Amino acid sequence: MRAWTRASGWSAGLAAALAVVIVVSAGIGPVRIPPAEVVKAVLNAVSVPAGVETTRAAVGTLWLPGVGLLTLPGIDLTYASPFAYSVDDVHAQIVVGVRLPRILMAALVGFALAAAGTVMQGFFRNPMADPSIIGVSSGAAVGAVAFIVFPAALSATVTLPLIGAVDVGLSYGTGVSLFAFVGALAAAFGVYAIATRHGRTPVATLLLAGVAVQTFLGAVISYLQLQAGESLRRIVAWLMGHLSGASWSEVAVTAVVVPPLFVILLVYARDLNVLLLGEEEARGLGIAVERTKRILLAASALITAAGVAFAGVIGFVGLIVPHMLRLVVGPDHRVLLPTAALAGGSFLVAADTVARAGSTELPVGIVTAAVGAPFFIYLLSNREVHEL
Amino acid sequence: MSVDSTAEGDADGAAAESTDESAANDGGDPLVEAIDLAVSFGDCPVVSGVNFRVDRGEFVGLIGPNGAGKTTVLRAIKGTLTPGSGDVRLAGDPTADLSAREAGRRVASVPQETGLAFDFRVRHVVEMGRTPHLGRFDGHGADDERAVREAMATTGVARFADRSITEISGGERQRVLLARALAQETPTLLLDEPTASLDANHAVRTLELVRDLVDDGRGALAAIHDLDAAARYCDRIVVLANGGVHASGPPAEVLTVNALRTAFDAEAFVGRNPATGTPAVTAFDTVSSGGADSGTERATSRRLHVVGTGRTAARVVARLTAAGHDLSVGVVPEGDAAALTARDADATVVAAPAFEPVDAATRESAVALSREADATVVVGETGGGTGRDQGERADPNPAVRRAANRLIRVTDDVDAAELLDAVRGPGDGESSRTG
């Protein structure tokens, strides 16, 4: 109980901090908007379902035997905006239409990467582990780069028997994200399959398999870059990580995918603590070790894939944020996991604000690495970091 | 990710069922039973044909030389290692049928060391012992709090409960692991070298604690290197050696010179600990006599008669017994150190009441023993200790010496190599030197 109380306290504080960072960030940019106005604009944009109405316009018909043709009425949710502050329309548009999706995407991606990084560091019992360690990032990169280089080959109209011509063409953004997501999961599964023998997955083997697969995929990415020609710039931009151009629909997809996976990880936080004692001891303490490892790996691979699919490879968030929070709240994953995730969200929002605040926009990956690495070195030299 | 899972049938439903079974089994079945257990790493067999059981109220010691498979057997019982063949049953149920959770409620283990990479608080590590009792969404209840508090109090770790596990000493850490196992509140405790990194005081306290728990109806199985401790605290001892169970039984029956020689390949003398009365094992370095490099080749066992008194003669008796010789001793004063040691060694002892003349019958039996022996070893100048009693009384030992087939005199401070070299017969001495 104590641990969950502590987790709630810290999480409440960090959630408040995240809200503040979001509000401040939304005010920063070519047009400065005071925080109070940002809050008003956001609250104005909030709409809650207020009622259900049937509409006259039929949306379809249904033929029931004995009854005949039924006309199905359309169902509409009516929304109401509970707030109506007076806000400058342009400011409202900038905040809600332009900045907020990008900021929320940054928060979600940071949240996902930090959560996955925390779990991977515990899983590998190594503070130097990060979400990309099982090949997720490299796989995502190969998928995304492949789509960028060969968009025509990968999205075309195919003629299927019976169904006819089907346009499987994807919009550029959706295509990149989808391929990145699939690539990430394929790489993670490949690493897992390589490292698994007779139903057991030794962590050390997993680590080495991850390194091998990452190296191989790195070669593939380099080769694809050679073939890239005109699209090389876009590849480089994707590989460095970027949050520009995030749309509300992308935010919605990420917001639907990330939280349930995070809940799964949180449910297994206590098991993860026990796994830190070593697998044999964990088994002796009643943990179904291999099953728990599979669940943790799958959930963190998925949550990482969801993060990198839209934002590209953003380094250091998943490495440094869990590390920092471990120094603050300790190694208990029941407290560490939610706090690191929330702090990861704040960190990436702040980093992305810096990335876009300058006269020329930087890829956010450059900012996280440039800020993160020196801070990490500071931690190493100033805090006693326990050797492994 | 579909993967054929191995020994991890762990549906929560199965766990609930077997809980009922274990309740039903509380009476009869042994807590731990190994049935024809065999484990191999790859093609290399570690142990095979291992049979033993641990009952309620029983402290079983698992001894054996390094690499005999003690830890392997413990791991097979814990279920972290799948046996090649045979079966381990916990309270009647094969470990393979138990979920990890259910196994964790039946057996708690104290490992030799823990490889904690992050600095958990001591209290938190002990709390992890409650894991098998908690549902996925349960917090610690009153029962859990009590178990953790009691475990920390009995093991004396409460004092540093809020320190980091990485900051405390190795011995303290071992006690934390014991506390964690106690918090698990299982009927069976498995201990792997529980006293390896403990000081003398805590080693005894730990074993006393385990003994108390066992006396309260639990069962314990401990791999122990300290044979004296095993003899003192265990009800039964299982000797693992040469890939199987070498001997098994009460300490006094199992801890014998011959058993130790074959199991440990060690020359050892088993005496009595004067403080506890339990068997006390003294191991000697195996001396390769004659400077030859045939260290494993032993001199053949000889029939030797020892004349001498006091601690020096006792030392000679112990060393010759450990080397596998068949000894007789006498005449010695009753209650003399040499007489006590010789009795511990199961040697034939001809003793006479001290400060009284030795009667003829006593003298004759010693003479007879000397005569039938391959050689007679005289310790010290006369083989008679201080000499204070001799002269004025009829000293029987000159007669004993005269009866010797071969007389070997050794000084009071003879070292082991000289002693063993001296008692070698001409036959085995030659074969060892040339071969």
Image: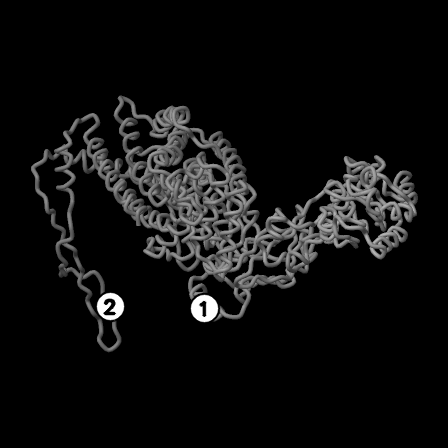
- Would you place residue A142 above or below residue B140 in this image? above
Helix, strand, or loop for circle 2?
strand
Real-space Cα separation, disc 2 to disc 1, in angstroms = 59 Å
Q: Splitting the image into 4 quarters, where does residue A146 fall?
A: top left
Q: Is residue B141 visible?
A: yes
Q: Which mark is residue A203?
A: none
Residue shown at 44% from the left, 69% from the top: B20
- Residue A46, percent from left and from top: 16, 44
Q: How many marks?
A: 2
Q: Which residue is mark 2?
A: A62
Q: Quadrant of residue A183?
A: top left
Label disc, if present, on residue B23 of the rendered structure: 1
Marks 2/1 same chain: no
Coordinates of residue B408 in the picture (x, y in percent): 87, 41
Q: What's the residue at 44%, 45% (across, down)?
A: A185
Q: Is residue B10 left or right of residue B86?
A: left
* In the foreground, A113 or B69: B69
Q: Callout 1: 10 Å neighbours few (<14), some, many (20+)?
A: few
Q: Residue furthest top?
A: A359
Identified by mark 1, the residue type is Ala
* B200 sits left or right of A139 in the view: right
Give left or right: position of B121 versus B380.
left
Chain designation of label 1: B
Q: Is residue B204 above or below residue A29?
A: below
Q: Secondary structure at mark 1?
A: helix
Residue A68 falls left or right of residue B56: left
Instruction: Say whether marks 2 and 1 touch (CB < 8 Å).
Output: no
Q: Residue furthest front?
A: B392
Q: Amino acid at mark 2?
A: Leu
